């Protein structure tokens, strides 16, 4: 049923938010530390395991798909509620941490997606194939 997909998403969100709050408390930060990201990773992990074992019916996936479409607006709204000024007042360390996270994320895209760069063909123009629709 569709409601099971929504329930699975809600459960992952609850676990992620609690984990983010606990991490924030352990590090002495009065904020949720990555709860939404933890929730999304948990949802990916759980749905992958359920699909692999054949325990995730199509109707349940529809409930998850519905909220996938809602994910970006929800994240934008949550990000807007964060105190960005406090992050900038944190100084250079906060800026470096953000830049490092972004750079590592960009570098990991090919690794996580499995795409590899194909080498460029070597040789002169006579050995390369012509563009589609063109002849020599």
Image (cartoon, grey):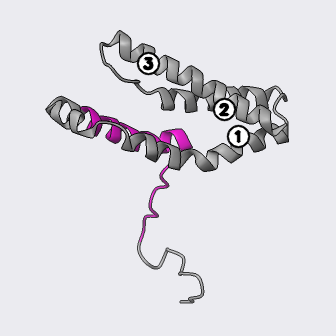
Q: Is residue 67 above or below residue 14?
A: below
On residue 21, the disc is 3
Q: Give the secondary structure at mark 1.
A: helix
Is residue 22 or residue 118 the one in the foreground?
A: 22
Task: Find residue 80 and report its image quarter.
Answer: top left
- Estimate the x, y position of residue 99 in percent, counting from the top left: 27, 39
Q: Residue placed at 73% from the left, 26% from the top?
A: 49
Q: Which stretch did the figure color magenta?
A: 97-123
- Estimate the x, y position of residue 40 in percent, counting from the top left: 57, 33
Residue 31 in magenta? no
| Badge 1: residue crowd in 10 Å (few <14, some 14–19, many ≥20) | many
Q: Residue placed at 72% from the left, 30% from the top?
A: 7
Residue 48 relative to residue 120: left or right: right
Task: Find residue 93 and report its image quarter.
Answer: top left
| Badge 2: residue crowd in 10 Å (few <14, some 14–19, many ≥20) | many
Residue at which label 2 appears: 9
Q: CA distance from mark 1 to mark 2?
A: 7 Å
Q: CA distance from mark 1 to mark 3?
A: 24 Å
| Badge 3: residue crowd in 10 Å (few <14, some 14–19, many ≥20) | some
Q: Give the secondary structure at mark 3.
A: helix
Residue at which label 1 appears: 64
């Amino acid at each position: 049923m569709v409601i099971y997909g929504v329930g699975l998403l809600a459960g992952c969100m609850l676990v992620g938010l609690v984990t983010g709050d606990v991490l924030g408390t352990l590090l002495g930060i009065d904020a949720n530390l990555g709860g939404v990201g933890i929730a999304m990773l948990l949802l990916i992990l759980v749905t992958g395991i359920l699909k692999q074992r054949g325990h995730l019916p199509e109707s349940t996936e529809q409930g998850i798909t519905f909220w996938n479409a809602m994910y970006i607006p929800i994240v934008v709204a949550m990000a807007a509620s964060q105190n960005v000024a406090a992050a900038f007042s944190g100084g250079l360390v906060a800026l470096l941490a953000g830049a490092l996270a972004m750079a590592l994320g960009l570098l990991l895209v090919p690794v996580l997606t499995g795409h590899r760069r194909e080498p460029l063909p070597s040789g002169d123009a006579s050995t390369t194939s012509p563009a589609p629709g063109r002849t020599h």
